[in-house]
Image (cartoon, rainbow, N blue to C red):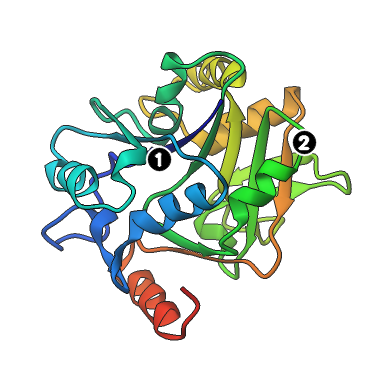
Amino acid sequence: MIYGSIPAGGKGSRLQPIGFSKELALIGRKAVIEYLIERMVLAGINNIFINTAADKNDLISYLAKKSRYRDKLIFTVKARKGLQDGILTPAKFLKPSDVLYFGLPDTIWFPRNGFSQLRKFPKGKLTLGLFNTPEPEKFDSVVIDDNHRVKSIAVKSPKPSSSWIWGIGRVHVSAAAKLNILSAKQKLTKPLFGVSMNAYAQSFPTYGICLDKSNYIDIGRKSDYERALDMFRNSLA
């Protein structure tokens, strides 16, 4: 089976003080996290894990009671352990043959059918949806070859070799354990998911799909939140 996985346990310290969880920041008439959920549902992903923390009561309450997608959501609540844990947590409840589609809850991006494009690409137990951005140094930049095979993933490199960044992805549950083993070798309290994925890509086939006419904004900073609002006002949402 296929599932969505959304890591929604972050404190959102860069955007504070806004007085509520950053995933509930409004873009138009929707909370920003609902754009990601909407894109998963558009791709036929109807069982979506929201992996969050116990102190994010406002987010849990809104999604469980008020969101139009509430019947499609499954909540896991645990202590914060970083992005990688936030994405891969559902794997422990699933079968090795199951697949997780993931994205970040404080982003808004196009094309809307990004997950649908990932579903159509048949290769790899780890496959990333790539967005072209003028500021790749703020993200994890990805270099691929002519066969879509990932050659390298650089985490917030000041001089990235590519303007393409990963923003969404698909990982088979059977690959999650390998990613966790690779992250353990980093010996960091909070493993960097981009570093783990790069290590995985050096040993196992990993693919990247460049999404046409892509646009990607992380609203984690107030200036970028304003950009997202402007993008909505220009009828792109």
Q: Which residue is mark 1?
A: 6
Instruction: Between label 1 and label 2, give the one nearer the viewer.
Output: 2
Q: Say which residue appears at 46% left-offset and 86% top-offset.
A: 234
**What is the x, y in percent for residue 228?**
40, 73
* Labels 1 and 2 touching (C-beta < 8 A): no
**Crowding near pointer 1: few (<14 within 10 Å), some, many (20+)?**
many
Q: Which residue is mark 2?
A: 122
**What is the x, y in percent for residue 132?**
65, 64
Q: Picture quarter containing residue 218?
A: bottom left
Q: Say which residue appears at 13% left-offset and 37% top-offset.
A: 55
**What is the x, y in percent for residue 72?**
37, 39
* Vertical relation: 32 (above or below) 41: below
Is residue 20 in view from this perspective?
A: yes
**What is the x, y in percent for residue 46?**
46, 39
The Cα–Cα distance between marks 1 and 2, rounded to whole angstroms, is 22 Å
Q: Say which residue appears at 80% left-offset and 39% top-offset.
A: 149
Q: Secondary structure at mark 1?
A: strand
Q: Picture quarter containing residue 6?
A: top left
* Vertical relation: 26 (above or below) 22: below
108 horizontally vs 50: left or right? right
Check the picture and name the quadrant holding the N terminus.
top right
Q: Picture quarter containing residue 175?
A: top right
Q: Amino acid at mark 1?
A: Ile
Q: Amino acid at mark 2?
A: Pro
In this rendering, the count of numbered labels is: 2
Q: Earlier in the sequence, mark 1 or mark 2?
A: 1
**Crowding near pointer 2: few (<14 within 10 Å), some, many (20+)?**
few
Is residue 165 in view from this perspective?
A: no
